[in-house]
Amino acid sequence: MELSISTPALLFSTVSLLMIAFTNRFMSMASLIRDLHLKFQKNPEDAIFKQIENLRLRMKLIQSMQIIAIFSLLLSVICMFLLFMNEEMIARWFFGIGLIGMSIALSLSAWEITISTKALEVELSDMEDIIAKRK
């Protein structure tokens, strides 16, 4: 297989879209953390504490996803430079490592989505408890 300079360039659009998604997750989570902080100061409940623990792990995962995605993009740039310098074999290694990094970032993203679902389950169970008490 011949690796042309346009092949690693394909990762640019992918990484850009992923970085937008990761940043949007981060921003919405930052807003949620600020809201939970105010609620917790007024009334420190167990449900809020569970959400805070969950958010701490999610923040670390999103940070890791962003760093790995940026690293993958950097490897693609290096790969393109190496192809420009006619160093195809070394460029293949950089491109391959970049693809592995992107796969890791996507896997972390799937894990973070699973964790966020658990956080929503905490919210739902809290509301269900309140509804059950009314009956």
Image (spheres, grey):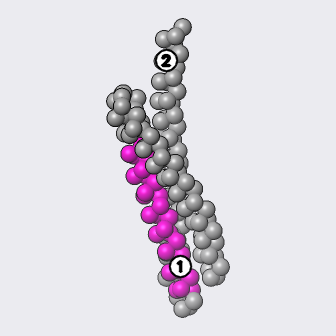
Residue 8 circle label:
none
Mark 1 or mark 2: whose residue is earlier in sequence:
1
Given the current orientation, which residue lies at the most extreme bottom position?
85
Is disc 2 surrounded by few (<14), some (14 to 19) or many (20+) residues within 10 Å?
A: few
Q: Which mark is residue 130?
A: 2
* Residue at x 38% of width, y 45% of height: 56
- Looking at the rendered image, the quarter that the C terminus falls into is top right
Q: Which residues are magenta?
A: 54-83
* Above or below, 88 relative to 64: below
Q: Is residue 49 visible?
A: no
Is residue 50 part of the magenta span, yes or no?
Answer: no
- Residue sitting nearer the eye, 2 or 113: 113
Left or right: 9 in relation to 56: right
Query: Is residue 63 at least partly visible in the picture?
Result: yes
- Residue 133 place in picture, x, y as percent: 48, 11
**Residue type at the position of mark 1:** Val
Image coordinates for residue 63, horizontal then vertical, percent: 43, 57
**Residue 61: % across, % down:** 43, 52
Whether pointer 1 and pointer 2 mark residues with C-beta atoms closer than 8 Å, the reply is no
Which residue, given by chain and number where applicable, does mark 1 sit on? 77
Using the image as rendered, state which of residue 6 and residue 117 is in the foreground: 117
